[in-house]
Amino acid sequence: MRNALVLAGCLAVAAAALVARAGSSSTPTYYRDVAPILDAKCTTCHRLDGIAPFSLTTAAAAKQHAAGIVRMARAGLMPPWMPGPDSAPLIGRDKRRLTQPELSTLAAWTAGGATAGNPADRRSTPSSGAGLGGPGRTITLQPVRPYLPHAAGGGLDDYHCFLLDPKLEQNAFVTGALIQPQRTGIVHHVILYEAAGAQATAATQLNAASGGKGWTCFGGPGLPFDVAGAGALDRLGQPPWIAAWVPGHATNALPPGTGVLLHKGAKVVMQVHYNLIEAAGPDRSRAQLRLRPATTRLTPLETQLIAAPVELPCPAGVSGPQCSRDQALQDEASKYGAEAAFIPVALLRLCSKTLADYPQDVGDGASIATSCQRSFSSRETIYGVAGHMHLRGRDIRVVLDPGTAKERMLLHIPAWDFHWQDVYYLQKPVTVTPADTVRVSCTFDNSKADQPVVGAKQLTPRYVLWGEGTTDEMCLGMLSVARG
C-alpha cells in the first residue's frame, strides 16, 4: 500500500512538472518570442541612440512598455507605416508592419506578465540602427566647425547652408546616403544639393565671404538659377538633389541598380533648416555617402518636385491683422527675404490657379484643400514618391493620371504626422510619357482648436501661406525618376 502511495505521489509530481513545462512553453517569453519581433521591426528607432523616446533592446525595458507596445501596435500606429492601403505597392511595407501572429504573440506575452524567460533562448540581436551597406566606398562630409542656429527677422527658423567638398576626381554614383542631424530636436530638414559649374563657383564665393561658416539660404541654396538641361525646370532652376533627411526618415539606400550621379569636381551644399521652437545649441550635422564608380551600370535617378499653392484663411470667428493675406506676405518677406513673398504668387501661376480658387469662407477651417497638376516633360520611369507638409497637414496624395481610366494612387498618407516622413520606393517602377499627368493634393486643418504649440502656448490662428518656417505650410510631392 505504502509503495502504491509513493508511486502515485511520484506520478502526481511528474504530471505537475509536465503541466508546468507545457504552460511555460505556451506562454511567450521575451527572449524566445518577443525579442525577435522587436529586434526586426522596432529597435531601429527604439534604441539608446535612436529617434524614439525610449529603448526596447532589453527585457526590462520591453516589460516596462509592454502595455503600450500592444496598444500602439493594435491601433496600427507602431511600427509607423504612414501610407494608406490604397497606395501603390511599396518596398518595405510588409517588413515594417506587424503580422497577425506577431500581434497575437505580443498580446499573449503582455497578458502573461511580460516574462523574460531564458536569455539563452534569444536568437536575434537588436538593430544597430540605420547604416549604409552594399558595394562601394563610403565618404563622410561634415562642416569644419559647429554652427549655433539663430533666427532672423523675428521668426523661429534659420536656414543655413554649409559647403562640403567630396573631392571627387571622377564622376561617381551615390547609391545611399545616411544623413545624421546632431540635434534632431531643432532640425526640420536637411537637403544635400550638387553644385557644379557656375553654381559651385557661386557656392565657394558665398562660403568664402562668411569666412568658411556657410550662409543663410531660405528656400533653395541661394545659388544662381540654372534652367539648362533635362529636368532643370522640374527643379525650378535649383541644383539637383542628392539626398534629404526629414523627421522619421529611415530609407537610406536607393533601389538596387540605381544611383544619383555626382560629378567630378562638384561641391555638395548641405542645407539645414533649424526650427527654434526648442532651445538651440551648436549643431554639426553630417552626411555619409556610399559611392560607386560612374562606369558601373546603374540607372541614374533624379528628384522632381510638384508644389501646390497654400492659402489657409482664418477660421470663422477669428479676425484681426493676422488674418490679412497682405499682412502674411509682409511677414514672410521680413522673416525670409523679399523673394519669399513671390512664392505664393508663383505657385498660383505654375498651377494655373487664382485666389478665386481659394475662398475666404472656410467655416471652422478644419478641412482646407489644395492641389496642383502637371504633365511630364519627357518619357520617365518613376521609382520613388514622397510627400511633405508641416504641422497643419492632415492628408496628402500623389496621383498619376487623375480623372482618367488610368488613374493610379502612387502615395496616400491619410493621417499625416510631421514626425514620421520618408521616401517610398515602388515595388514595380512605373513608366510615364508627356501624355501622362501627376497631381499632388493636400488637406490642412487651420481651426482654432488645432493650431501649433510654441513654448507651451497655442498659436493664434492666422492666414497661412506657403512659407519656409515650420509654423508656415507646404504642399509638396516628390518623385524619384529616371529619364528616357
Image (spheres, rainbow, N blue to C red):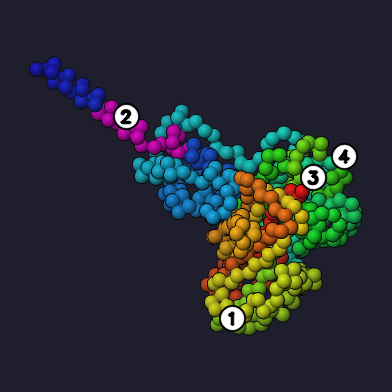
Crowd around label 1: few <14 · some 14–19 · many ≥20 (10 Å): few
- On residue 169, the disc is 4
State the residue in front, 122 or 186: 122
Report whether residue 332 is seen.
Answer: no
Q: Are marks 1 and 2 in contact (CB under 8 Å)?
A: no
* Residue range corresponding to the magenta coloring: 16-35
In the image, what residue type sits under mark 1?
Asp
Task: Choose the circle earlier in sequence order: 4 or 3.
Answer: 4
Task: Choose the circle earlier in sequence order: 2 or 4.
Answer: 2
State the residue in front, 45 or 146: 45
- On residue 21, the disc is 2
Q: Which residue is mark 3?
A: 261
Q: Position of residue 255 (x, y in %)?
A: 67, 42
In the image, what residue type sits under mark 3?
Leu
Q: Which residue is mark 1?
A: 361
Distance from Cα at disc 2 to Cα at disc 3: 60 Å
In the image, what residue type sits under mark 2?
Arg
Report whether residue 104 is seen.
Answer: yes
State the residue in front, 108 or 232: 232
Q: Main secondary structure of the magenta part?
A: helix
Crowd around label 3: few <14 · some 14–19 · many ≥20 (10 Å): many
**427 horizontally vs 222: left or right:** left
Task: Choose the circle earlier in sequence order: 3 or 1.
Answer: 3
- Residue 15: say if magenta: no
In the image, what residue type sits under mark 4?
Glu
State the residue in front, 429 or 255: 429
The mark lying in front, picked from 2 and 4, is 4
Task: Choose the circle earlier in sequence order: 2 or 3.
Answer: 2
| Residue depicted at 85% across the width and 54% down the height | 229
